[in-house]
Amino acid sequence: MNSEYYFQKGLHLIVASAVIFALIVLFSAMVSRGFPLWLALVLLVPAGLGVVGFYFFSLGSSADLSERFFRRFGRSQPRGEEKTMTEGVGSEQWCERSPDAIVPESAVVSADPVPDDRILENALATVYEYTDKDLGDAIDETNLRILRRRLLYLACMTPVPNDVPQVQLRHDRVSYGDLCHYGWNVWNAFKGATNRFYDQTELAEWLKASFESLAKYNTKTLRAKLRATDGGYRIRLLDNLKEYIQK
């Protein structure tokens, strides 16, 4: 677990405590003003539903807050490695472009970025194995190579070239909610390797651009589904990909 996880858990605990306290105060106030106990309980139900709704709304807000906090105060260089900047690219990159570097299996063009950090390279290898396990029956070899190339760019936090095609899946094998869970899992693996935090909207945009079946959804919808637990998803949210792969 990383520090962002505990930060969010702390926020959730604070909000939950505030919700419970507000309900207790409301109930006590009604009883002290002479409301019959049964009437106070009846009136507490709609008020409680409203407060609970606020709580669940705050869960997403706390995730945004934690991301902004860590972008502002918790961002650091990965394990002593220096960042490199590529001319013409607005985002920072943790990978280098080198014609002499060994091109990973996922790359189909020698100009693709190559991880220059062993930790990130290991995380990428783990994500490849995880992809084979959770999407193996929904993707053919050609599209698997395309997906691995897109994952390489995501790991390096580098914009994907426009000439990289979208990934086509067997649509009856995986839902859009499953793909959102898949994206969340690999994104977490890369975040842990680089120790860099950035907005979840970037992940939603990557998913929309990467998978043909997600092109019809807007970014806001995809972002809302990243950690959704409202349905029977085949791909579940994971904290540790290595442990999951070894099972």
Image (spheres, grey):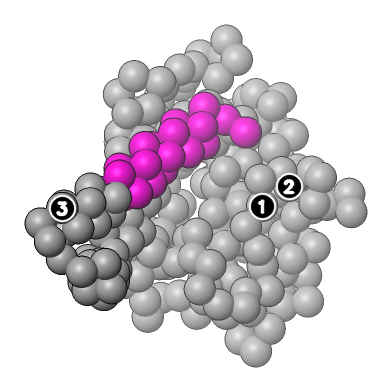
**Helix, strand or loop at mark 1:** loop
Viewer-side residue, 175 vs 150? 175
In the rendered structure, are the residues bearing label 2 and label 1 in contact, judged by CB atoms less than 8 Å apart?
A: yes
Q: Nearer the viewer, mark 3 or mark 1?
A: 3
What residue does disc 3 label? 32
Horizontal side, residue 76 vs residue 144: left or right: left
The residue drawn where x is 53% and y is 67% is: 229
Magenta segment, prevailing SS (helix, strand or loop): helix
Q: Amino acid at mark 1?
A: Leu
Label 3 or label 1, whichever comes before in sequence order: 3
Label 2 or label 3, whichever comes before in sequence order: 3
Q: Could you classify mark 1 by the number of other residues whose Cα lies within 10 Å: few (under 14), some (14-19), or many (20 or more)?
A: some
Q: Which residues are magenta?
A: 1-22
Q: CA distance from mark 3 to mark 1?
A: 47 Å
Viewer-side residue, 198 vs 247? 247
Tally of numbered discs? 3
What residue does disc 1 label? 238
Q: Amino acid at mark 3?
A: Ser
What residue does disc 2 label? 241
